[in-house]
Image: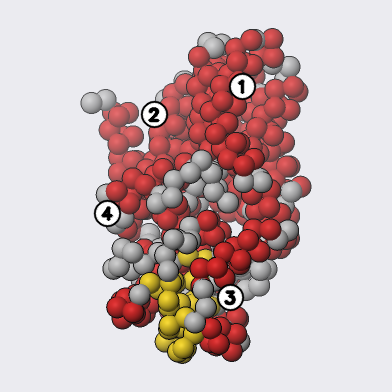
Amino acid sequence: MTRKSLLLISFIIAKFVLQYVLVNPVYELHRDEFLHLDQGKHLAWGFLSVPPVTSWISYFINLFGNSIFLIRFFPALFGSLTIIVVWKAIEELKGNVFALVLGATSVLFSALLRLNILYQPNSLDVLCWTTVCFILIKYCNSQINKWLYFGMTVLALGFLNKYNIVFLIAGLFPAFLLTRQSVFKNKHFYLSILLFLILILPNLIWQYNNHFPVYHHMRELAKTQLVYVKRWDFIKDQLYYFIGSLFVIFSGLYSLVFYPPFKKYRIFFFTFWITLTVFIWLRGKSYYAMGLYPIYIAFGAVYLERLINTDWKKYLQPIVVLIPVLFFFPMYQLMFPNKSPEYILNHSGLYEKYGLLRWEDGKNHALPQDYADMLGWKELAQKTDSIYSRLASQGQTLILCDNYGQAGAINYYSKNNSIGAVSFNADYINWFQLDKKYVNLIRIKTFEKVSKELETTSPYFEKSYISGNVTNILAREFGTTIFVFENANVDIKQRIKNEIALVKNSP
């Protein structure tokens, strides 16, 4: 085994180890993870908020036991593959061992460690962005048409994973025009685009048949979340994500303009600035742009290797490699869920200083939003599971939740495989089992909506009461209440059908 191979394996091992140790055991799964896992039980060519690829992975996870280890394995895997792609890009750019180590270190010790903790489409999204750019480098070097087809295939995979990759297309296409690429005269370019369209066609058909839910999802996202995104905060966050390797990224951007051997890659210079501008203009969330940076680390690492590869400058190489590592230590203290909620409360001023306590509503809270979204779920599921088991002898019980996090958490942590919690929120609205005759209802209500539930629903049942609630004050679901309604005197199924129709037909 060569020295380079051993080094690469070392980085991959370090990546996997870090991804598992950077999560304090006190934290549970994230609300989004529960939704993605349940999508694996309802395979389709699309979902209300995401394309289908994550559901395929979830199907595999469900097949092999749904363990926390396996759930966290896949984002760690995609993060490791991102390091490998950057490594291969550096080799394609003729970088030596120093450039390889610098590039891998820069990618490893970055905010990708945070992104790769959660089982969401984001980790594969970054990998697809990076791989498309690597393939473009291969095409620039060889002009071999097969790379066009490979690139479009990966682009299609990225599209079927997360629509966010459209922003990369939005940056690449004008960059092609600005650099007057001869690719527009190549018939294989258009044939590869046709391949891309064929690969994503099943999802486009699904979107059409379901009245383009992605449009409604993005409109809702813009109203409830993106409206709070401040453009200056977006820019600041970009600096934080790869703060230890900013000098490498800026070196890469500089080299694309002023370093003659990289002249043929100038398309990447324009792609970077155009894509970033589109994100800023549309008020995209900060992490949407994270896939943009790894390939520029490859360019920067190779350029810095050429810059400090002579005489006394060689002695600077270990120092340069150490910079991303040194920046990781303050990141370790703040950027990961490796600290207990009590620790964060005791150091809230520091977290607030860096904007880590600001949620999507634009307000500061006790914990970072992702951490608060990783608490209280087991408590809710266990209490609900207990009630569901007790009611089993009376007949079928419907568990109706206010949001997808509640439904997904109950389905994941329940010991009863038939529990089937649902909601009118997200994809759960399509997963009601309307062939069952329900006689009982367990209603899960968020704290803000509990006041009139008994008054509104109890007339339709012989017995109604509050069974419990989420008591963890730091959980985002704190106060979420479990209402129990027994022995219905109306047709629950018909009322559910009416409500589903009302929700689906609402603008």
Q: Percent position (x, y) of residue 486?
A: 43, 83
Which residue is depicted at the point 62% across and 42% down? 209
Q: Which mark is residue 193?
A: 1
Q: Does dot 3 land on a helix, a strand or a loop?
A: loop
Q: Nearer the viewer, mark 4 or mark 3?
A: 4
- Residue 365: assigned label: 3
Name the residue: 53% across, 10% down.
144
Answer left or right for 446 relative to 38. Answer: right
In the rendered view, does 305 fall on the left or right side of 420? right
Tag on residue 65? Answer: 4
Where residue 14 appears, x then y in whole percent?
32, 46
Residue type at mark 3: give it: His
- Mark 2, residue position: 97
Q: Is residue 473 visible?
A: no
Which kind of residue does numbered mark 2 sit on? Val
Q: Nearer the viewer, residue 270 or 298?
A: 270
Q: Are marks 4 and 3 in contact (CB under 8 Å)?
A: no
